[in-house]
Image (cartoon, rainbow, N blue to C red):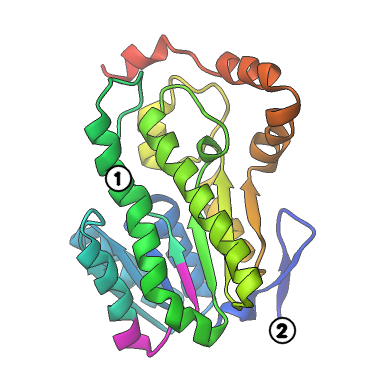
Amino acid sequence: MACTKYLSNLLFDLAMLKGKRVIITGASSGIGEQMAYQLAKMGSHILITARTEEKLKKVAEKCTELGSASAYYIHGSMDNMTFAKQVVHEAERLFGGLDMLILNHIGYTYFGFFDGDVDHIRKLLEINFLSYATMTVEALPMLKASGGNIVVVSSFAGKVGLPLTVPYSTTKFALDGFFSSLRMEFYHQKVNVSITLCVLSYIDTDTALNTVSRVIQQPAAPKEECAYEIIKGGAMRQREVYYQYEATKIPMLMRDWAPELLEYLVLKNYNVDGLSKNKE
């Protein structure tokens, strides 16, 4: 079987995902879209979801061209918990089970100083956190049966509080608390389902580039490599994935031991004057 070595010392067998049944949320663009293409090349059965039907249709068609065992889509908004459950039920209807649940979607939020709107945080929590928990609960019976994987796409902003991202960072911290606690309970209950939390740096998705490119000074990491690392981490049942490593894991070492230094380095990386240029 073909193996490849990619960005780390872990050997990842591409055949591990052949025939696996996978849900990918937030898959109409960006990292989610790239994960769909990676899994298609590996021969997985794929169900993708996002808000925009036309974009999903094109992604599903390309997945079929790339060699997916099957590719389906279902569109809707994750602020509706009924829809979140419906996605899982659709996977059960189509595939008869589930091997991997990749939770990647996010709701719209602003990039700027906190405006005091707590209702916005509440609405964002529904999409960025509560729908993740809802889908996990709904998918658990199938994942327990298959000994499957839950892959949670988070952010460095979910480990370290960052400026200009108060609502977003709040929801990502919630993901860490929920899924890290759930992982520990799975261990005690001997539940054979892995949980992989993905801590991502600044990635070159269209949304990120359009929003923060004039403010954050560091270069954006490639979304194709990021997608691969996420899939590999989930398949290898890693506890956490850090991408890019030097932009996420290394700063994490300073979080508790030298927090003032970390804050200094983070703030130095931000050109706040660029906020006004982004609005032009």
Q: CA distance from mark 1 to mark 2?
A: 39 Å
Q: Secondary structure at mark 2?
A: loop
The quarter in which the C terminus is drawn is top left
Q: Residue at x 66, y 22 (%)?
A: 262
Outermost residue, right side = 9
Residue 135, x across and y down, in percent:
36, 67
Q: Is residue 11 above or below residue 98?
A: above
Q: Secondary structure at mark 1?
A: loop
Residue 279, x across and y down, in percent:
27, 19
Q: Is residue 181 above or below residue 42?
A: above
Q: Is residue 110 above or below residue 132?
A: above
| Disc number for residue 1 | 2
The quarter in which the N terminus is drawn is bottom right
Residue 159, x across and y down, in percent:
57, 38
Q: Residue at x 51, y 40 (%)?
A: 158
Residue 111, x across and y down, in percent:
35, 26
- Write down the residue under mark 1: 107
Specify whether residue 139 is painted magenta. no
Identify the magenta region. 92-101
Q: Residue at x 56, y 38 (%)?
A: 156
Specify whether residue 94 is painted magenta. yes
